[in-house]
Amino acid sequence: MALPLRDRISIVKGDITGMQVDAIVNAANTTLLGGGGVDGAIHRAAGPGLLEECRGLGGCPTGEARITKGYNLPAKYVIHTVGPVYRGRPRDAAALRSCYRHSLELAARHGVESIAFPAISCGVYGYPVEEACRIAIDTCLDFLKQDEGISKIFFVLFGDRELEAYQACWKDVAARI
Ligand code: ADP
C-alpha cells in the first residue's frame, strides 16, 4: 500500500549528485550539452558517458524533459528538463509547471519509484524561489495524488535560503492535506 501523501514528499539539504534514488532531475539548458550550476555538478559526477548520450538527444525545448542513464551516479537515471529563464510572465509559471509534470511522467514510464528534484530555474535562470517552490510542490503533489507508481519525491536544496523557502511552503501545504 502507498505511503500517506504527506510522507511521499521530503525536503532535504545537500548535493543532488549523491542522492540514492532511482532518478535525479537535472536543471539543464536547451542544448543538453552541460553548463554550470547543478548541470555541471551532475555531468562531473556522472562522467563522460552522460555527455555522450546527451549529444545523441538533439536538445530539449523549455518545459520538456529527456531521460538518460545515470552512469557513475548512484541514481539509475538522469531526467534532464529545461526550466524557463524568469521574466515574470505567466508563461514562465506554465513552463516551470510543465518541467515538473513532464519529468514525473517520464519517470513513471520508466518505472521510477524515487526521484529527486533540484530547485529548477532558481539559480542562473533567476526564478524567485518563494514562487518556484510553490509551483514545484503543488505540481508534484497533484501528480502523486493520481499516480501510485512514484512513491517518493525529494526536493534537494543546495542553499539555506532555498531550503527555508521550501520548508515554509511545504509546512503550509502539508497542513491542508
Ligand atoms: P537554472 O539554470 O535552472 O537556474 P542552476 O543550476 O543555476 O539552474 O540552479 C538551480 C538550483 O540548483 C539553484 O538553487 C542552485 O543553488 C542549485 N544547485 C547547484 N548545484 C547543486 C547541486 N549539486 N545539488 C543540488 N542543487 C544544486
Image: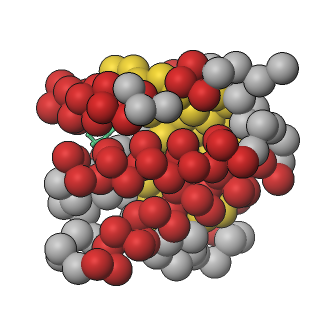
Residue at figure coordinates x 63%, y 49% from the top left: 143
For residue 91, above or below residue 56: below
Residue 87: where, in percent of width, then height? 18, 76
Whether residue 91 is visible here, answered yes or no, is yes
Of residues 141 and 123, the one drawn nearer to the viewer in this rendering:
141
Compared to residue 176, the image places residue 100 above or below, namely below
Residue placed at 57% from the left, 70% from the top?
A: 64
The picture quadrant where one finds residue 105 is bottom right
Can you say which quadrant of the picture contains the N terminus? top right
Residue shown at 57% from the left, 49% from the top: 142
x, y percent for residue 115: 62, 35
| Displayed quadrant of residue 84 | bottom left
Residue at 39% x, 21% y: name it.
Answer: 12
* Residue 91 vertical placement versus 21 (above, below): below
Instruction: Using the rendered view, name the quadrant where residue 113 is placed.
Output: top right
Question: How is the protein colored in the picture?
Answer: secondary structure
Q: As displayed, is residue 145 above or below residue 109?
A: above
The percent position of residue 99, horizontal first and vertical second, equals: 51, 62
Q: In this view, does 88 lie to the left or right of 9?
A: left
**In-image side of 111 versus 173 (left or right):** right
Looking at the image, in which quadrant does ligand 1 appear?
top left
Residue placed most toward the observer, 40 or 6: 6
Q: Position of residue 90 (x, y in %)?
A: 29, 78
